[in-house]
Image: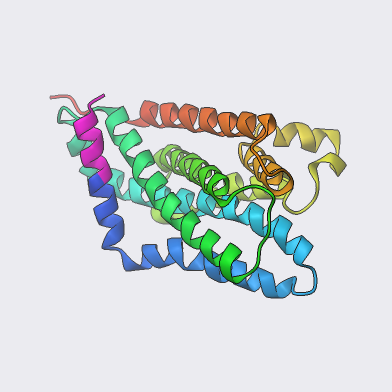
Amino acid sequence: MSVRITLNTVGRVLTQIWHDRRTLAVLLLVPCMLLTLLRFIFDGRPDIFDQIGLMLLGIFPFVSMFLVTSVAMLRERVSGTLERLLSTPVQKLDLLFGYGIAFALVAIIQASVASAVTYGLLGLRSQGSVAVVILIAASTAVLGSSTGLLTSAFAKSEFQALQFMPAIVVPQILLCGLIWPREEMSGALQALSNVMPLRYAAEALREVETYPLPTDLMWRDLAVIVVFALLLIAGGAATLRRRTA
């Protein structure tokens, strides 16, 4: 890997995002709007809003980065940009880590904006600090990006890339504990959720909700998220094919 090439990739991706106003709106405004709507839905039950709203602060980056990354990488594959880049000294991991770092930076901004709105204007409360919430959100964003990078290899159009969402993202949301406690699910569903990385993000955020300082369980869950992300990036690297003369 080359640090210079990786940083150049980061700069290129961030520039593309900056010039795409609709993508910026989806990343920065939509989560705040949805959290505001959720606050009014649970207007009489702030305790429920504290629990669900905190979880969504970690889930939104995963979903949004999965969508943006899968479509962006697919465009580079279809347009031939990726093939041209791989005909140069650029390595596969330079590209993939460049994408991951770029979207992690965007996720930090997204989580910071959403947290400022949720904690400052909507009155969300948690025992843990906002900084830890942002750290978890950034980790889930990298996880979403690495998932999108891998799944983009199996799509031939943007429509096909979006079709992976109900198959990959929705089951994780249903089984992570957001809608129903995992402890009250059947043994089979609990076992299935154990191989879904979003379940560990939800558990880490519950620890932040309950305890003022980071716990060992939270750090373990965060480490599991990072391992999943690295494995998916390695899988994405395996799908890239370098053009030979």
Residue 44: quadrant of the picture: bottom right
Residues rendered magenta in the picture: 1-10
**Residue 83 place in picture, x, y as percent:** 22, 37
Is 4 magenta? The answer is yes
Q: Majority secondary structure of the magenta segment?
A: helix
Say whether residue 174 is left or right of residue 148: right
**Residue 163 place in picture, x, y as percent:** 52, 52
Q: Is residue 118 above or below residue 160?
A: below
Residue 2: quadrant of the picture: top left
**Residue 103 place in picture, x, y as percent:** 39, 47
Residue 204: quadrant of the picture: top right
Is 92 magenta? The answer is no
Residue 156 is at least partly visible in this image: no
Residue at 79% of width from left, 68% of height from top?
45
State which quarter of the image contains the C terminus.
top left
> Total marks drawn?
0
Q: Name the residue nearer the viewer: 62 or 78.
A: 62
Residue at 47% of width from left, 48% of height from top?
66
**Residue 169 place in picture, x, y as percent:** 59, 48
Residue at 68% of width from left, 59% of height from top?
125
Residue 12 is at least partly visible in this image: yes
